[in-house]
Amino acid sequence: MKAFKTMALTLVCLLLGIAIAWQYSSVNENLVLAQYEKKNLSQLVEELLMERNNNENLRARIEELQQEVDALKNDENMDMKYVEDLKKSVLMARVMAGLETVKGTGLVITVESGGQIKVKASHIQELLNELKASDVQALSVNDERIVATSEVREAGDYIMINGRQLVPPYTIKAIGDPDRMERSLRLMGGVLAKYQVYEFNVTLEKSDNVVIPAVRDDGTVIRTDKLTPVTQ
Amino acid sequence: MVKTHKILMFVVFLLLGMLITLQFRGIIQNNEGQMSIKELAASLEAEEAEGRRLLEELNNLEAEWSQLLNNIGSRQRDPEIMALINQRDYEYFRAGLTNVRGNGIVITMQDAQTAGSGDIEDYIIHDADITGILNELRINGAEAISINGERILGTSKLVCAGPTIFLNKSRYPPPYVIKAIGDPDILYDAIDQLPNVAIMRIYGIRIDIRKEYDMVIEKYRLYESVDEWLSHLEVVSE
């Protein structure tokens, strides 16, 4: 009788132990799952906002183009409008290509080595990429305009952009939304935090009048000798 | 009597334990998170469909617009206007607003199929890997570059967004197809010998490089109003 009682008690305790362990592990597992779902949720929200924003932009572009088309169709003085449009398109394309000097609101950043570590091409490239990620509209390093074919390369103690050797301190000018660009540069673990670790001397200034010069137009930076335009 | 009582207690406790366990699992699995994820996914899908529709509308409108301009252009006899048309075509060509044809290379990159030991981050492609390749292409004389059909300009955005990349205005999952027009041999050797390409290959990231002749790289597309795109700047006339 006593032996049976002990055995029953042991069995109950054993089952209880298993149940608790099972419970614990399942709760734990669910916590991980819940976390994953939460991350998924914020990612979904982010994607949704991005898609909405993209669609807003598309609608604005469609409206803009529709107006152009309507104006071309309806304007009695169509040829006048046409010439005006042509001139506008030429200018817009030249701005996009970096062939026009532009000014606007933005940031002026200077970077210089402050200790053992030299400022390398890759450091500057990281900064440029971060600015591009914040929707920069025009960009230059030591007044070399960054265009579609601009390289950033190491050349001994200096860096080279657009085939020109640049010497420190490097002055990066960026036209765009100054607050947004500054925020992304100052992110935790971001570009400026890294620069601090490298002991670079950095200045950052917001300005309403950042002037960025045009790229030199001699066929050495914007090269087209290997390209043929495809006419539709 | 005592024996029956004990067995009864045993069964009751057993049931209780099972009930509590089931309860916990049920609560966590049925939390409202799942419901809103479903809703969000549905709205995202709707928004994406709307985006595709808008893009098609924009395509049609662009075709109509350029047709209209061509019609008006072909009527022009004024040499000044004809010179202006030529200038427009030339500047569009230089700005990346025209499809272009030429020889070059095509690089196809895909995440590793299975992650080995170590950090999972090493087995997927990052924005810095791609911007590094873009820079190398430019150093070696590439004249036009696109990634997954998006023409890359001087200010083009390229950021990692989870397992995808965000390019200009859109998000792309792998594989990433980089096309570059330039000297095919020079470009091929430059990318094939890039240290970071060798490192990525060690981790099993698949990078295929091939020379391609007479390929087309698409023009940059405006996905937003021009005024918005250049909202922060004005032209300084000299």
Image: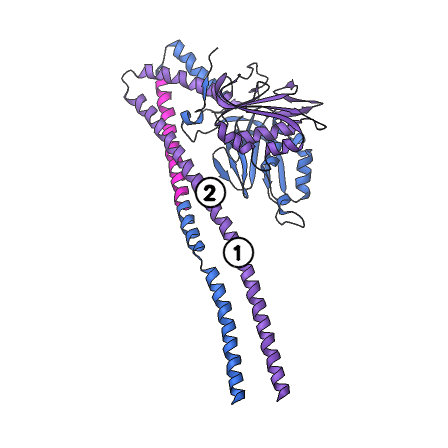
Chain colours: A purple, B blue
The chain identifier of the residue carrying mark 2 reads A
Report the front residue among B104 and A114. A114
Magenta part, dominant SS: helix
Position of residue B212 measured from the top left corner of the image (x, y, whole percent): 59, 31
Q: Residue at x 59, y 39 (%)?
A: B126
B42 on left or right of A106: left
Q: Is residue A194 above or below residue A157?
A: below
Q: Is residue A125 visible?
A: yes
- Quarter-of-image position of residue B160: top right
Position of residue A130 measured from the top left corner of the image (x, y, whole percent): 56, 31
The chain identifier of the residue carrying mark 1 reads A
Look at the image and say whether residue B47 sits in the magenta stretch.
yes
Give the labeled residue for mark 2: A46
Position of residue A116 measured from the top left corner of the image (x, y, whole percent): 72, 28
Q: Label 1 to label 2, Cα distance in Å?
A: 20 Å
Which class describes the residues within 10 Å of circle 1: few (<14), some (14-19), or many (20+)?
A: some
Q: Is residue A100 above or below residue B197?
A: above
A72 on left or right of A134: left
Q: Is residue B140 visible?
A: no
**Where does the magenta region start and end?**
B45-74
